[in-house]
Image (tube, rainbow, N blue to C red):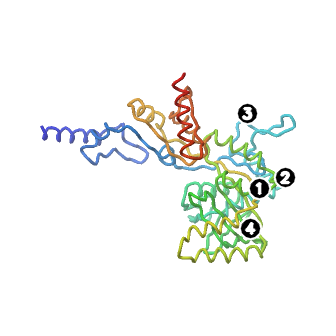
Amino acid sequence: LIVTMEVVKFQQASLINSDLDMYYEKTDTPALCRTSSLVEELGQIEYIFSDKTGTLTCNEMEYKQCSIAGIAYADYVEESRKARIIDGEEVGLHDFKQLKLNLKNHPTGNVINEFLTLLSVCHTVIPEWKDDNPANIIYQASSPDEGALVKGALTLDYIFTTRRPKSVNIRVNGVDLEYEILNICEFNSTRKRMSTVVRGPDGKIKLYCKGADTVIMERLSENNLYVKKTLNHLEEYATEGLRTLCIAMREISDEEYRVWSSIYEKASTTLVDRQEELDKAAEMIEKDLFLLGATAIEDKLQDGVPETIYTLQQAGIKIWVLTGDRQETAINIGLSCKLIQEEMSLITVNEESHWATKEHIEKKIQEVKGR
């Protein structure tokens, strides 16, 4: 009997290896059964916990839309969504061609310049030149998001060309501009933002900061002009399933930088709780920010994801998708991949403690049972 079972397992493994339905043509990757007990183990699965980025999605980020100074732009705008005036207020989208025109002859031109400069300067990307054509630059990025933002700036003629240990160069309208990198406050999952302190060609010191809307908004100075419109645009991006970041900056006086720099230098050389001390130092300078706008990046679902999730659900397997996206974006992705159905009752839990969460869930369960 044992020999028979082993032969059956071996045959099942062979069938998996030769199953054309499991073959992925794009990367020429067939299914590979690494253990003969795989089939019986698969039959016992009750839950699947899946990451979103790169698992459900292609992990190929494309810079699609942005909000700058309260004005929404997109790489392509359908006729029905083009900008127009309704009741004295502008609604809809401008295309990137209009963005380039606004940069030259619009009151928001300076904000657009700072926005695109930030995308070109505030990152850790390394450029690789294949020839003299900027369109062929390959950007080596630690995350696909960073690469997409730098490429987005390139399409708008803000070309990141060179990285040196203490400076970066960008090319704007054929003119090479050098920015001295004074400090980089790196992104981590706790901070949810990244900042770069630079000295520009004009000699001014500026802090460029990009990050999640929740952390950027609470660090803005009072009377920011574009907060309301930017938040509205963020909601729209989230409902389209786009990944969003807020973009902000501030100017820093030489004296303020001198004081802060000594604190940051001390934190960077400490041997005890170094990361915590660096985060505290960054917190001191990342304040009173001016909101420039927001970015929206698309990461398309992989082929066959909705059908696969449906098949797994039909087999009685419960699917969880784990993501750090905005709640609205996560819900939209859930609908797109058929994890959430239109007829389902959607329960959102935003409580701040495990006790409150427990009570909220129990209350909702009782409501569902009472229907």
- Callout 3 secondary element: helix
- How crowded pointer 4 is (Cα within 10 Å; few <14, some 14-19, many 20+) is rated as some
Q: Decide: marks 2, 1 in contact (CB < 8 A)? A: yes
Eye-nearest disc, 1 or 3:
1
Instruction: Provide the residue designation for mark 3.
Output: 80
Quarter occupied by the N terminus: top left
For mark 1, give the secondary structure.
Answer: helix
Residue lying at the far top in this picture: please name it.
Answer: 371
Amino acid type, mark 1:
Ile
Q: Which mark is residue 106?
A: 2
Query: Callout 1 environment at 10 Å: few (<14), some (14 to 19), or many (20+)?
Result: many
Quadrant of the rendering where the C terminus is positioned? top right
Q: CA distance from mark 2 to mark 1?
A: 10 Å
In the picture, the disc for residue 206 is 4
Earlier residue among tags 3 and 4: 3
The number of callouts visible is: 4
Query: Extreme right residue here?
Result: 88
Q: Position of residue 360 (x, y in %)?
A: 57, 37
